[in-house]
Image (cartoon, rainbow, N blue to C red):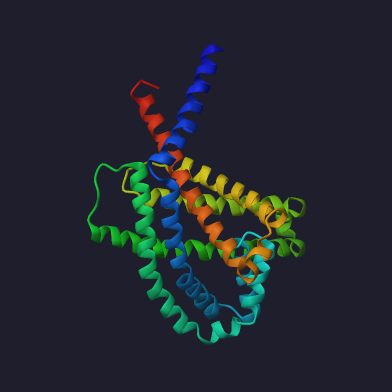
């Protein structure tokens, strides 16, 4: 029993104490602010590319459905996602009409902006995971370019997955072979599980590919698991706060949406840094065990 409590004490001291110490030592909140700014810079060109791609492959009605689905996941609060949907609804045709120039401007802008974003992420993760050696700047820029393409592909797949589930659900009602796909009573659980899985995979990809340190798969997986959990927890807590406690509309008026999105992006950046710090603490604990001192 004493051995068990000593283990619990050591576990809590290592992770909670270590996390508190690292937040101060690595200036985690300051790093999160810089990362949030880089994310802001990437938003406009990224949105232009998404509209350009969807405008080329979808009809107007389908495009509206896809855009609304994307907005609901990017803006995790219905009152604000409804505001964005109404704003964009009347401009779908404009995006379809100017899809080529929007795509060109978006690609050029994203290449420039994303380089700064992934450079910020790499700086943060290298500071957390402490690689043995760096890489040439050209290799770093090529990695940034590859990450841009990977994130775009991942985002498009995640945008399409829920409509695909919806199609399967309706097909299951009409086709005997697909009856096993009927999950009406489990629908919310399935949607939450799929959404959480994509959040986890997104964080896992970032933690695995961006830092120079060789981490294996356990450290990025644990970092991604905690980052996804903290992201979802922050979404629920922040959502309850702005809907039930905060008086943002009275204070900020028409700028309310911008304030909410800015705060949410900063929270997401904090979660990204905290996930990395937890992963590094786990990595250090593994090293202690392997050396016979843990």
User: Residue 140's image quarter?
Assistant: bottom left
Query: Can I make out residue 188 in this image?
Result: yes
Q: Can residue 74 be seen in this view?
A: no
Q: Nearer the viewer, residue 30 or 165?
A: 30
Q: Residue furthest top?
A: 2
Which residue corresponds to the image point at 54% horizontal and 82% vertical from the top-left? Answer: 95
Q: 71 and 161: which one is in front?
A: 71
Residue under the point 46% across and 39% down = 278
- Outermost residue, front side: 251
* Quarter the N terminus occupies: top right
Q: Residue furthest bottom?
A: 97
Residue 125 at x, y percent in the picture: 37, 48
Whether 241 is drawn above or below 94: the answer is above
Q: Name the residue at 65% across, 66% down.
A: 81
Residue 132 picture quarter: top left
Which of the two residues, 43 or 294, is positioned nearer the viewer here?
43
Would residue 267 be found to the left or right of residue 282 on screen? right
Q: In this view, does 106 lie above or below 42?
A: below
């Amino acid at each position: 029993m004493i051995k068990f409590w000593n283990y619990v004490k050591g576990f809590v001291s290592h992770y909670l104490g270590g996390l508190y110490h690292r937040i101060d030592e690595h200036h985690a909140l300051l790093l999160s602010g810089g990362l949030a700014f880089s994310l802001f810079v990437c938003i406009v060109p990224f949105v232009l590319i998404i509209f350009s791609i969807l405008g080329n492959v979808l009809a107007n009605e389908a495009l509206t459905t896809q855009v609304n689905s994307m907005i609901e996941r990017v803006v995790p609060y219905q009152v604000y996602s409804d505001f964005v949907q109404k704003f964009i609804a009347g401009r779908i045709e404009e995006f379809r009409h100017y899809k080529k120039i929007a795509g060109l401007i978006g690609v050029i802008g994203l290449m420039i902006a994303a380089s700064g974003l992934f450079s910020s992420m790499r700086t943060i993760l290298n500071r957390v995971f402490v690689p043995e050696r760096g890489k040439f700047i050209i290799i770093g820029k090529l990695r940034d370019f590859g990450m841009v393409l990977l994130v775009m592909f991942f985002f498009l797949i995640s945008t399409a997955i829920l409509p695909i589930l919806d199609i399967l659900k309706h097909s299951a009602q009409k086709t005997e072979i697909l009856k096993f796909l009927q999950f009406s009573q489990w629908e919310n659980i399935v949607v939450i599980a799929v959404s959480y899985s994509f959040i986890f995979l997104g964080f896992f990809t970032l933690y695995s590919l961006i830092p120079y340190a060789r981490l294996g798969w356990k450290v990025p997986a644990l970092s991604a698991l905690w980052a996804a959990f903290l992201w979802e927890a922050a979404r629920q807590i922040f959502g309850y706060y702005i809907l039930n406690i905060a008086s943002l509309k009275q204070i900020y008026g028409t700028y309310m949406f911008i304030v909410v999105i800015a705060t949410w992006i900063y929270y997401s950046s904090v979660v990204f840094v905290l996930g990395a710090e937890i992963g590094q603490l786990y990595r250090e604990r593994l090293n202690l065990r392997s050396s016979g001192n843990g």
